[in-house]
Amino acid sequence: MALNKETKTKLLQKYATHEGDTGSPEAQVSLITERISQLVEHLKKNKKDQSSRRGLLILVGQRRRLLSYLERIDVKRYQTLTSALGLK
């Protein structure tokens, strides 16, 4: 369930805060959100895949922690990111 290189590059270009950025909360949340959507589609077809379900829950928790960090440090960046990704 890894992201392919083209999708990853496209997401990083869209949400990166500066050139070559892969570590900002915006970039990380966008990549995690894409992986979550892929896992949700996989689990719709494969309902009994418990290991992928666990991976999904881990990713959701990781995204939640990153979003709460971003909300703590800069509310405006948090609001723009959640509206751009369609979260909340």
Image: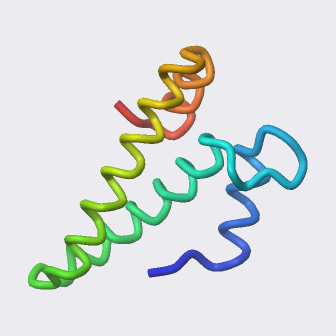
Which residue is rendered at x = 31% and y = 50% of the image? 61
Q: Quick check: 51 above or below 35?
A: below
Which residue is rendered at x = 36% and y = 59% of the image? 59
Which residue is rendered at x = 57% and y = 20% of the image? 73
Which residue is rendered at x = 69% and y = 51% of the image? 23
Apparent side of residue 57 relative to residue 50 in the rendered image (left or right) = right
Looking at the picture, tell me which residue is in the foreground, 41 or 35.
35
Residue 14 locus on image (x, y percent): 74, 47
Q: Quadrant of the N terminus?
A: bottom left
Spot the residue most to the right.
Answer: 19
Apparent side of residue 70 relative to residue 61 in the rendered image (left or right) = right
Say which quarter of the image contains residue 56.
bottom left
Q: Quadrant of the C terminus?
A: top left
Q: Quick check: 55 above or below 28?
A: below
Residue 26 locus on image (x, y percent): 62, 41
- Give the number of marks: 0
Apparent side of residue 55 relative to residue 1 in the rendered image (left or right) = left
Residue 52 locus on image (x, y percent): 26, 78
Q: Quick check: 37 above or below 24?
A: below
Q: Quick check: 30 above or below 43?
A: above
Question: How is this picture coloured?
Answer: rainbow
Residue 17 locus on image (x, y percent): 78, 38
Looking at the picture, tell me which residue is in the foreground, 58 or 49.
58
